[in-house]
Amino acid sequence: MLFALPLIAIMSVGVNAAEPPPPPGIVEVFGCNYNDGKDNDDLMAARDYFVKQSEKAGVPTQPSYVWNLYKGGIPLDFVWFTAHESLAAFGANADAGFGKEELDLALERFNTVGSCQAGMMTIRDLFVREGAEADGGGAPTLVSSSACSFQPGADESDLRDLGDHIAGVLKGMGDEAPISVYGMRPITGGPNIRDVYVFNLNESASAWSGFIANLVTSEAGQRLGRHFDSVLDCDQSMWGAQRVIDPQEG
């Protein structure tokens, strides 16, 4: 699919005022519900077919992730993310697959499994724990996600300050911090799209609960919570997530 892509800013962290932040990554987002009689096994079979068809067509695959809903009032069964390093990379990847019969057949296979609403977002990492891989190394993780709207009067400068504050507090938590924290901003819209999405990856429910306990009992965490609430009004959900496609060379 091709989209009109306006330039949208996202939180920048630790960037000197005289230096522009690096361009954000791009994520294709598919929010989905399973069709009748379909489940995760069918989704993974469609994934396997897509990888096979991509190899046959000589089109490189990009890192892709699936989130399965764990807790929260979200009317979705799962979300599929495909990541691209930049807007230019997305364009090159889209062009490489455009009109390829092999990939059209793979898309048809996905459509038998789930009914999805597609969108695109920019993404930046706000924090990555020292020594950790930003996506948890592809292993299953617990994701705590905040879907947020700006509080009245808050703007992009407040969002940038909040991003810096998040990074500073989490850096001071050492191994008790999440694996990573990301911020996403929508490029394409829709009736249920929020202004900002912030999510953190954790090794387990125990790791997440320990992180939250630290936040709510420490002075630094309480200050961060007040700052967060002054900028963003959020709904919370939790997801089980893992990388389901590794990148390939074309």
Image (cartoon, helix red, strand yellow):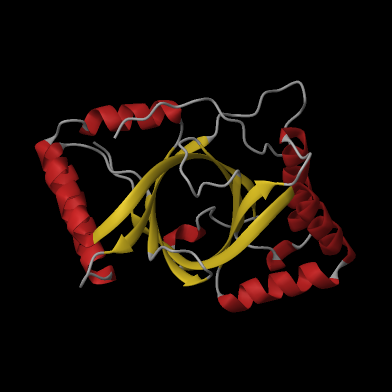
Q: Residue 23's x, y, as percent?
A: 55, 29
Quarter of the image containing the C terminus? Answer: top left
> Residue shown at 66%/76% (left/top)?
209
Residue nearest the observer in this picture, 30 or 129 = 30
**Location of residue 70 in the rendering, given as x and y in whole percent from the top left corner:** 48, 73
The residue drawn where x is 52% and y is 46% is: 193
Q: Image check: 226 left or right of 67?
A: right
Image coordinates for residue 117, horizontal then vertical, percent: 35, 49
Q: Does the rendering let one see residue 83? A: no
As drawn, the residue found furthest toward the bottom would be: 206
> Is residue 47 visible to the viewer in this orientation of the structure?
yes
Image x and y of residue 3, in percent: 37, 30
Residue drawn at point x = 28 percent, y = 69 percent: 40
Q: Residue at x 11, y 42 (%)?
A: 102
Above or below residue 62? Residue 243 is: below
**Residue found at the far right of this picture:** 219
Occupied quadrant, residue 11: top right
